[in-house]
Image (spheres, rainbow, N blue to C red):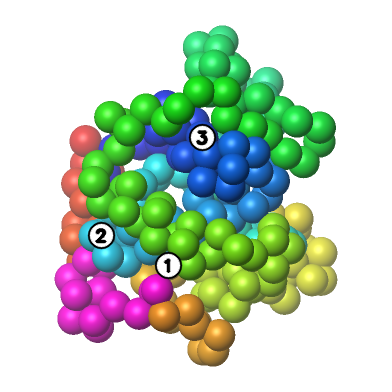
């Protein structure tokens, strides 16, 4: 599995801004990206962005993509310039797309999954998406620790994205158990290979 690619992440941010009518709440975009990575992993055994996810009080956050949105000091000048070309901050909580998405950086399945996620979840607000995220196992396992204040964030594991929530499951994530198991095995084998390289 290839590591995080800031170019693809910027295009994902641009994609969801344009789907929303050219501007979108930052937290909503990050939740839609998490949902897209979750669905793509379950359907095809790989994520779209291969970002590093953390569980925070308001739900999962793709850390490197958030850094791009926040124009973090961790970014290189190239990353900052490319980000500025495609997206622009509007106030504290929103951003807009400056130019069209470069679809050449996505596979067909990437685009299909992001489109499916927007169709299914695009009508929710950022806070509704935050509430929805609290039902999913990859966040739920940290719920008590987040509430007690042991830490403000916890590193999430992609393996947990294959787990089904106990309730409030959205039908979009329902996948044949055998296919889900095969995709999980494919993902784990690729992780082993990447660790050997």
Image vertical order of residue 173 relative to residue 56, above or below: below
The answer to the question of whether label 3 and label 2 lie on touching residues, with beta carbons closer than 8 A, is no
Range of residues picked out in magenta: 172-184
Name the mark on residue 161. 1
Instruction: Residue at 59% x, 18% y: name it.
Output: 84
Foreground label between 3 and 1: 3
Would residue 166 be counted in the magenta stretch?
A: no
* Residue drawn at point x = 49 percent, y = 82 percent: 169
Is 181 part of what is drawn in magenta? yes
Q: Nearer the viewer, residue 80 or 25?
A: 25
Q: What residue is pinned by disc 3?
A: 14
Q: Which mark is residue 45?
A: 2
Q: What's the CA distance linking mark 3 and mark 2?
A: 24 Å
Find residue 18 and report its horizontal and vertical position in percent: 53, 39
Mark earlier in primary sequence (3, 2): 3
Where disc 1 sits, the SS reads: helix
Task: State the SS at label 2.
Answer: loop
Q: Residues within 10 Å of mark 3 (few under 14, many from 20)?
A: many
């Amino acid at each position: 599995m290839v590591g995080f690619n800031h170019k693809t992440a910027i295009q994902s941010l641009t994609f969801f801004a344009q789907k929303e009518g050219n501007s979108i709440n930052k937290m909503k975009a990050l939740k839609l990206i998490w949902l897209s990575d979750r669905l793509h992993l379950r359907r095809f055994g790989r994520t779209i962005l291969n970002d590093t996810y953390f569980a925070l009080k308001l739900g999962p956050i793709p850390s490197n993509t958030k850094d791009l949105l926040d124009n973090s000091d961790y970014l290189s000048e190239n990353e900052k310039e490319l980000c500025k070309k495609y997206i622009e901050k509007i106030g504290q909580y929103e951003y807009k797309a400056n130019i069209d998405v470069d679809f050449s950086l996505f596979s067909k399945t990437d685009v299909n999954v992001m489109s499916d996620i927007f169709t299914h979840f695009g009508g929710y607000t950022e806070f509704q998406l935050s509430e929805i995220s609290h039902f999913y196992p990859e966040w739920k396992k940290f719920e008590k620790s987040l509430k007690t204040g042991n830490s403000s964030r916890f590193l999430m594991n992609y393996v947990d994205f294959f787990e089904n929530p106990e309730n409030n499951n959205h039908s979009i994530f329902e996948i044949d158990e055998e296919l889900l198991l095969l995709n999980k095995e494919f993902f784990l084998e690729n992780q082993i290979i990447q660790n050997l390289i």
